[in-house]
Amino acid sequence: MINFFVDGKPVQAPEGSMVIQAAHDAKAAEIPYFCYHPALKPAGLCRMCLVEIEGAPKLQASCTTPISEGMKVITKSARVAQARKDVLEFYLLNHPLDCPICDKAGECMLQDYTFAHARQNSRFRDGEKRRYNYEDLGPKLFRDMDRCVHCLRCVRFCEEIVGDDNLSVFQRGNHTDISIFGSPVVNDFALNIAELCPVGALVSKDFLYQSRVWHLKKTETICTSCATGCNIYMESKDQEVKRITPRINKAVNDHWICDYGRLNYKYVNGDQRVQEAVSRESGEIAVTTPEDLSARIADLLGRTPKDRAGFLITPEATNEEIFEFRRLAEKVVATPNFAYGLVPPEEGKLDFLRNRDKFPNSAGVRRIGASSGLGFNGMKIVEKAESGDLDVLVLFYPHSVIKHPNGAALLTRLAGALSKVKTSVVIDYLKSPASDAATWLIPGLTHAEKNGTMDNAQGMTQKIRRAIFPSPAVIPEKDLLVRISTALSEKGEREKGRKGERESAATT
Ligand code: SF4
Ligand code: SF4
Ligand code: FES
């Protein structure tokens, strides 16, 4: 470890650290910056991070200056303050007055630094600001080069993290332009650039003009679009998810998320949601309530021989739901026909972030299922249903079967199996061929609408948190399962009591 000083405060940091990172990590000083990013290689481009180093005649860029033993760094001095003013004046010479219409407003580093460090009056009296022509970078990013501060974070991210050199720097000096070699920026991580860009030069087309960022409620949760379990903020307004942004967790996703996970939120407020409880019996379709159906399920399971009832849950469920589902099937109904998942999910890393397994909680299934020796063997239940060996089949989140490579065929087969049992029950938040075929359909909650935990591919148990309130017509699935188990247990107790009474009456 190296010992040095920041504004007179003693600080320790590992050898090789740059001044800015060491000062920030130790919370010793806040040094402004544009081009520095803790996950990218130092570039020393913007000069916003200038500090005094005792003994050095000129100000130094703290993002490219390594710490040394006994070094004395000064971040609060008239020279440093003047340098910040000058650098900002240089950027503002050309930066347009776009804040009222710029998506980055509210989280723009240039806006914040101008407020904190810039001179209060502009000395710019006349003359044209630099102008660029509009150029489309592809389906994901909106580009406005008039706002660019030439930090090159966007280009460095593509090269260093993604390994895609399509985005590049064209021209030099006052004409510097961030553009593409013909084909659009479509790599699977391109939307990270919208966060990386310190200003509104490259912004997400998906979020363009959707909301001012200060109106968004940020909920700390995890992405449920694959087994990596990236840490995210789910950002919502008026009970609608507006965008997903990464939350730093060095052990899971560092600073990044993939575009698939980032954009996979529209189903929450989409028209494919299961909205209400439905009963389809004797050709009649009736809208009912989850309370009514849970009572009817408990009654039916109480009358069904345990080896003619089947239960199947997918790794889309939370640990708490899997636990309650298992309790209902294994302990309360005590059926041998219980499985987690239809077939084993794919395994292994797809790239530096994504997992081949698109289910968020396969590790939770393995952990909870380990004690009963079960796991991903649901085809046995499907085969039993197909051969007429089941009277009741309860499915939890069957829509997620589509995540398997041959998911469409599996879902069709599952829906076909449902038509072979007398009563099929589907609990789900999205419609699918299985929900269309169910006798009783109960609406569920998406991961944006409930709390719980899931285990990621590394075996880390992480929390999902409710970002928006669900419809009051929906009972959270865990509570629904508890309700069915309790009703069944009470029914069992009552029947045991009655049987005992009959036996004692017979012996007297
Ligand atoms: S587009 Fe944004 S990230 Fe890229 S160089 Fe310009 S300001 Fe930096
Ligand atoms: S890598 Fe997986 S968990 Fe991470 S954002 Fe993408 S889909 Fe979500
Ligand atoms: S942050 Fe140091 S030069 Fe840009």
Image (cartoon, helix red, strand yellow):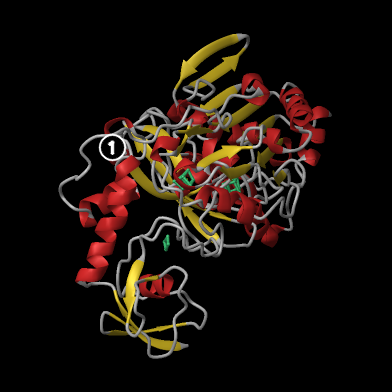
Give coordinates of residue 174: x percent, y percent: 44, 44
- In this rendering, is residue 8 above or below 194? below
Residue in front for this viewpoint, 435 or 324: 435
Residue at the image point whose x is 38% and y is 90% from the top: 70
Which residue sits at x=60%, y=56%?
456
Q: How far from the left and from the top, in percent, is residue 255?
A: 51, 56
Q: Position of residue 87 (x, y in %)?
A: 32, 56
- At label 1, the amino acid type is His
| Residue closer to the observer: 354 or 135 | 135
Reading the image, the residue beneath label 1 is 215
Q: In this view, does 87 lie above or below 172?
A: below
118 relative to 281, above or below:
below
Q: Is mark 1 within 8 Å of ligand 1?
A: no
Q: Given the current orientation, which residue lies at the most extreme left position?
A: 121
Q: Is mark 1 on a helix, strand or loop?
A: helix
The x and y percentages for residue 428 are: 56, 32
Q: Quadrant of residue 393?
A: top right
* In this picture, residue 36 sits left or right of residue 252: left
Query: In percent of the image, x 35 and y 74: which residue is there?
Result: 58
Horizontal placement of 414 versus 59: left or right?
A: right
Query: Going by the image, does 434 lie left or right of 177?
Result: right
Residue 508, can we see it?
no
- Work out which residue is located at the far top of the displayed protein and give it: 283
Residue density around tag 1, few if under 14, some if 14–19, many if 20 or more, within 10 Å: few
Is residue 261 left or right of 183 when viewed as pictured? left
Residue furthest toward the front?
127
The answer, for residue 16, to whether it is visible in the render is yes
Task: Work out whether residue 295 or residue 497 is closer to the camera in this orientation and state it.
Answer: 295
Query: How many numbered discs sit on the rendered protein?
Result: 1
Q: Which residue shows up at 63% across the image and 11% down it?
A: 282
